[in-house]
Image (cartoon, rainbow, N blue to C red):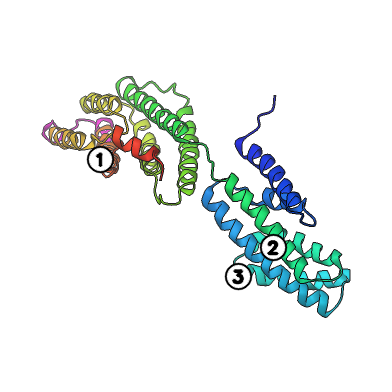
């Protein structure tokens, strides 16, 4: 069975309502109101408002151009081409290019009338207002995406935890059987989540930011560090005492992966761990030296990982409710 989305339902219902109203008002070409509604249904409230204004403005320009070209030159197919030759660049210049297709409907109405009168212009303006107005009303409803954003958050945290488990196990046993699928999965989830969070911002006129969006941006930066350190970890071929200490630290970090902010305490532990490394005996072999150097590099990168999290204000239950609240 195919799935019908909420936008499809709004488009279908909105077109039917627009046509019914235009017919009820006794407007000529009343079916065109449905076309205008279909063109103005957008994925977000802000986008709908912006494109609706652009379409309305472009239609007014189209009426003016139609009067000048049709009444001034004549009602001929070549005149339509000449009109569009000037109309389209002007519309683009005035940043109303979204209204070009919509305006074409109005232009053809005026062309087929063979004579532009004041009543005909009022009829076209009423058609535009009806079609765009219904679209704006239909777009007032946007389903909440908070549940999906929360699911994305949990999925990202789960993948990050699994990646840290693999790092931990490799440091302890050098097991290289991991297929790395969590890497591609995490990247895909973060991208989808950021897109959805940004769309949620666009659906609130008074909200200019989204806590979830900042959260996923933060995770994206952390994930870039993880991708960068994996080859460093993979380069370690011998077991050293420092590897066990780092593995234990990684275990603590992964057990504390959540939207809250506890990075500061781990930064303190990281500083203590580095001091511990400095007090340990120097490496005796080249392999041990390279392993410890790689671990030190990894520790520096983990410090950046934690600094990024420390700069995020966290998502307590109160903040999550704020992120989910209406504007």
Residue at which label 1 appears = 303
Q: Which residue is pictured at 89% across the width and 71% down the height?
A: 76
Q: CA distance from mark 2 to mark 1?
A: 62 Å
Mark 1 lies on a secondary structure that is: helix
Q: Earlier in the sequence, mark 2 or mark 1?
A: 2
Q: Residue furthest bottom?
A: 72
On screen, residue 229 above or below 39? above
Give the residues in magenta: 277-290
Q: Is residue 285 magenta?
A: yes
Q: Which residue is pictured at 69% across the width and 59% down the height?
A: 126
Residue at which label 3 appears = 94
Mark 3 lies on a secondary structure that is: loop
Mark drawn on residue 100:
none
Mark 2 lies on a secondary structure that is: helix
On screen, residue 300 above or below 153? below
Q: Is residue 43 left or right of residue 323?
A: right
Q: Is residue 66 left or right of residue 257?
A: right
Q: Which residue is pictured at 39% across the width and 39% down the height?
A: 325
Residue at which label 2 appears = 125
């Amino acid at each position: 069975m195919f799935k019908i989305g909420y936008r499809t339902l709004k488009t279908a219902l909105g077109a039917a309502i627009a046509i019914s109203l235009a017919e009820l008002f006794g407007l000529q070409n009343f079916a065109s109101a449905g076309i205008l509604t279909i063109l103005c249904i957008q994925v977000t409230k802000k986008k709908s408002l912006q494109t609706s204004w652009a379409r309305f403005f472009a239609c007014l320009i189209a009426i003016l151009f139609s009067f000048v070209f049709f009444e001034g030159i004549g009602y001929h197919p070549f005149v339509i081409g000449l009109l569009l030759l000037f109309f389209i660049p002007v519309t683009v210049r005035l940043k109303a290019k979204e209204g070009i297709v919509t305006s074409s409907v109005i232009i053809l109405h005026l062309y087929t009338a063979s004579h532009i009168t004041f009543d005909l212009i009022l009829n076209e303006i009423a058609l535009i207002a009806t079609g765009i107005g219904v679209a704006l009303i239909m777009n007032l409803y946007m389903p909440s995406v908070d549940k999906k954003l929360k699911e994305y958050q949990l999925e990202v945290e789960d993948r990050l935890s699994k990646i840290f488990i693999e790092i931990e196990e490799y440091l302890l046993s050098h097991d290289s059987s991991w297929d790395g699928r969590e890497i591609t999965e995490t990247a895909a989830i973060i991208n989808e989540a950021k897109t959805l969070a940004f769309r949620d911002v666009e659906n609130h006129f008074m909200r200019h930011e989204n806590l979830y969006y900042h959260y996923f941006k933060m995770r994206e930066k952390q994930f870039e560090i993880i991708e960068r350190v994996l080859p460093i970890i993979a380069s370690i071929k011998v077991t050293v005492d420092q590897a066990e200490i780092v593995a234990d630290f990684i275990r603590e970090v992964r057990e504390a992966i959540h939207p809250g902010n506890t990075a500061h305490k781990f930064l303190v532990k990281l500083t203590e761990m580095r001091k511990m490394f400095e007090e340990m005996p120097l490496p005796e072999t080249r392999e041990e030296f390279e392993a410890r150097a790689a671990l030190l590099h990894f520790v520096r990168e983990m410090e950046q990982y934690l600094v990024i999290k420390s700069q995020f204000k966290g998502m307590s239950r109160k903040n999550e409710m704020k992120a989910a609240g209406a504007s």
